[in-house]
Amino acid sequence: MEYVIGGLIILILSLVGTPLFALIAALGLAALYLAGIDTGVFIVELHRLADFPALIAIPLFTFAGYILAESQAPRRLMNFVQALFGWMPGGMAIVALFTTAVFTAFTGASGVTIIALGGLLYPALLEHGYPEKFSLGLVTTSGSLGLLFPPSLPIILYALVAKVSLDTLFLAGLVPGILLLLVLSVYGVRSGSRAKIRLIPFSLANLWRALKGTAWELPLPFIVIGGIYGGFFTATEASAITAIYVLIVEVFIRRDLKLFSDVPRVTRSSMVLVGAILVMMGAALGLTNYLIDQEIPKALFDFISRFVTSKVVFLIVLNIFILIMNMIEIFSAIIIIVPIIVPVALQYGINPVHLGIIFLLNLELGYMTPPLGLNLFLSSIRFEKHLPAVYKSVLPFFILVLIVLLLITYVPHLSLLLTNSTAK
């Protein structure tokens, strides 16, 4: 009876808009109390948050991403990719895909990509002759592309919560992320060819001009990825290098932002997101401790194994479960769900790094899944389109991302290819 009453109270609090971190904390404290466990354990687990070596990467990468979003870097990057690929049938679609993927990797799937880049890309696609439905679907889909590329914030969170190597997870996401971009690019080329879109003649002068324009921002992904996997610095150190580099470039070299007016504003905005994530993580750790102490994952595995004995079937169930749970905000989904599913997946022999890639790609898909995907709402508001029109526009892209997800799910070698080669 106590559990029923507690559950009803939590439900009522959620319906009246109580912050999620407060709900998680309340649930954790109530669970510990009802189980007869000292609630001081919750505070101990909260304090343990400070011991995560990669924790500092969250605020630093988030700050760097927000600085880039507020600067003119997205426009310069788009001009460069357009000069490089604009001569191809479907070149503008490739421009949109690659620009947003790089941008989302640094900003996280927080909706910034659609808001910041959508106003540039959507009119550009229409201007070049792409069908409105295709253009709307592409820009909506691109709002969550890049989650598998370093230094994606969801990758960092998953590594912390699942207790896997951040460097390994960064490496594991590269092949699946590139595969997804290639599949969507092929569709973009096909659509561009059928629509007979206007091509941009290739010009070395234009390419050189665009390259000079983005000369300071373009090396950034190579510095981060190359530095980590070249053994020059860790992912945590990369976050500090990235934050300092971006600040110097956009404030003192490019002068897109003012030091004493824009930087404090951007810092405040980025740290609000970071603060919410850290508080939620701290609350979730206490709840996770209770779940493990009460052997909830083991009980869940015992229950599932009665009906699901095949690893193949379990992966189908897992993907459906994660997709449904993506109705929760992305960071909350990682913090709440991962501690429960990782021990269960291990019982089925699923590598936690491979599971991480499945989980993150599922998040990308969840952002564009009707009726609650965040990208759909943002796109509807940003481009003043009715939601049913957005649903229809995103359907072909949804199917392609789903196909890639299934491929990644059942061919774990794609996720573990680079990690296995570096291990040797």
Image (cartoon, grey):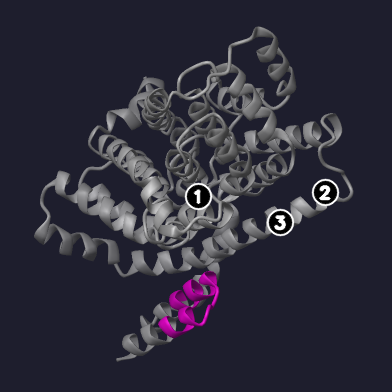
Decide if residue 414 is on the left or right side of residue 303: right
Calculate the distance from the C-alpha at mark 1 to the C-alpha at mark 3.
19 Å
Q: Nearer the viewer, residue 35 or 345?
A: 345
Task: Determine the residue positioned at 10% across, 61% down.
Answer: 306
Q: Is residue 135 visible?
A: yes
Q: Nearer the viewer, residue 367 or 22?
A: 367
> How far apart are the alpha carbons under marks 1 and 2?
28 Å
Q: Identify the amino acid type marked 3.
A: Ser
Segment tinted magenta in the rendering: 11-28
Residue corresponding to mark 2: 262
The image quadrant where one finds the N terminus is bottom left
Residue 113: in magenta span = no
Badge number at residue 269:
3
Residue identifier under label 1: 157
Residue 404 placed where, x, y %? 31, 36
**In the image, residue 276 above or below residue 156:** below
Question: Which marked residue is nearer to the observer: mark 1 or mark 3?
Answer: 3
How many numbered marks appear? 3
User: Is residue 22 highlighted in magenta?
Assistant: yes
Dot 1 or dot 3, earlier in sequence? 1
What SS does tag 3 mark?
helix
Residue in view at x 12 percent, y 47 percent: 310
Look at the image and tell me in which quarter the C terminus lies.
top left
Secondary structure at badge 2 equals helix
